[in-house]
Image (cartoon, rainbow, N blue to C red):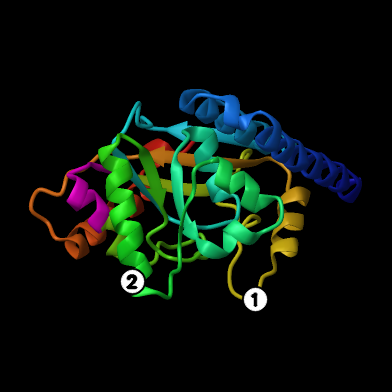
């Protein structure tokens, strides 16, 4: 029965993805920026529902920009989970732009793309991020640069934090984790790391019952004279503390 239910969820997810792409191509260009944000957040919430994942939000998401959200990175689900908690524009690797279906959805959500191996492209993206922050956007990055194992937070790369310094914008730490809804224990089902394949991670997620995604928003910070490396290290500490705070367990 577990596998039958998982197959039904998989079909529902596929239909939801294709329906999202249809909406993007047919109606998205006619919507205002605020309407687009509402549609993206509603779509993300509906996708979590199709995956039978409960969303739990702790702390206060930003009401408006400019602000840069920095979060730990665990799974292919992280972007969906953060969009469901609060719409934001992500900075993502350039490969995502070319992915079937997903690329079109990422474009519609306002994703900024970066060639991670190129120092020159990183400078371009930092400049673009600073412009968007100065325009009042809510941006989001995963400073670890890759997905972790879910048990620990890897060091934060500092390059993209420079955009907040240039724009004189606050940065808000965000802690992500997945848990068993019944016991509160951390769940590694959605993890996507190492030799794992996307298909295997998706299937584990589909076959795991009582899964919840927890998004914990910390307090926004300003640079206060810190350089990007110092600030990145302090932001990592804030994310680690958020994940460890027993008051945020549900």
Task: Say which of marks 2 and 1 sits in front.
Answer: 2
What percent of the width, then of the height, locates residue 69? 36, 45
Quadrant in the picture for residue 115: bottom left
Q: Quadrant of the N terminus?
A: top right
Q: Residue at x 43, y 75 (%)?
A: 117
- Indicate whether residue 167 is drawn in magenta: yes
Q: Residue at x 57, y 56 (%)?
A: 75
Residue 120 in picture, x, y percent from top left: 33, 71
Question: What is the number of the mark on residue 120?
Answer: 2
Q: Secondary structure at mark 1?
A: loop
Question: On the image, numbered disc 1 is attached to which residue?
Answer: 195
List x then y, in percent, for residue 51. 72, 41
As rendered, which of 124 and 70 lies closer to the eye? 124
Which span of residues is magenta-colored? 162-171
Q: Could you tell me which residue is drawn at 35 percent across and 37 percent down?
A: 137
Q: Residue furthest left?
A: 225
């Amino acid at each position: 029965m577990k596998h039958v239910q998982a197959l039904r969820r998989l079909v529902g997810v596929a239909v939801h993805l294709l329906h999202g792409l249809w909406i993007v191509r047919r109606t998205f260009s006619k919507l205002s920026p605020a309407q687009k944000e509402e549609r993206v957040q509603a779509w993300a919430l509906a996708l979590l529902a199709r995956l039978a994942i409960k969303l739990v939000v702790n702390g206060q998401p930003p009401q408006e920009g400019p602000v840069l959200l920095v979060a730990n990175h665990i799974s292919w689900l992280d972007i969906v989970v953060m969009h469901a908690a609060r719409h934001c524009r992500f900075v993502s690797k350039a490969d995502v732009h070319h992915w079937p279906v997903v690329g079109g959805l990422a474009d519609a959500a306002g994703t900024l793309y970066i060639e991670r191996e190129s120092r020159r492209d990183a400078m371009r993206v930092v400049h673009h991020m600073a412009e968007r922050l100065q325009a009042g956007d809510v941006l989001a990055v995963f400073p670890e640069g890759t997905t972790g194992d879910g048990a620990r937070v890897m060091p934060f790369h500092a390059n993209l934090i420079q955009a907040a310094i240039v724009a004189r914008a606050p940065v808000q730490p965000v802690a992500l984790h997945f848990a068993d809804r019944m016991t509160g224990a951390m769940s590694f089902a959605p993890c996507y790391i190492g030799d794992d394949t996307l298909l295997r991670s998706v299937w584990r997620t589909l076959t795991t019952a009582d899964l919840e995604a927890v998004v914990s928003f910390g307090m926004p910070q300003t640079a206060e004279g810190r350089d990007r490396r110092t600030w990145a290290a302090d932001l990592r500490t804030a994310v680690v503390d958020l994940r460890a705070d027993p008051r945020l367990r549900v």
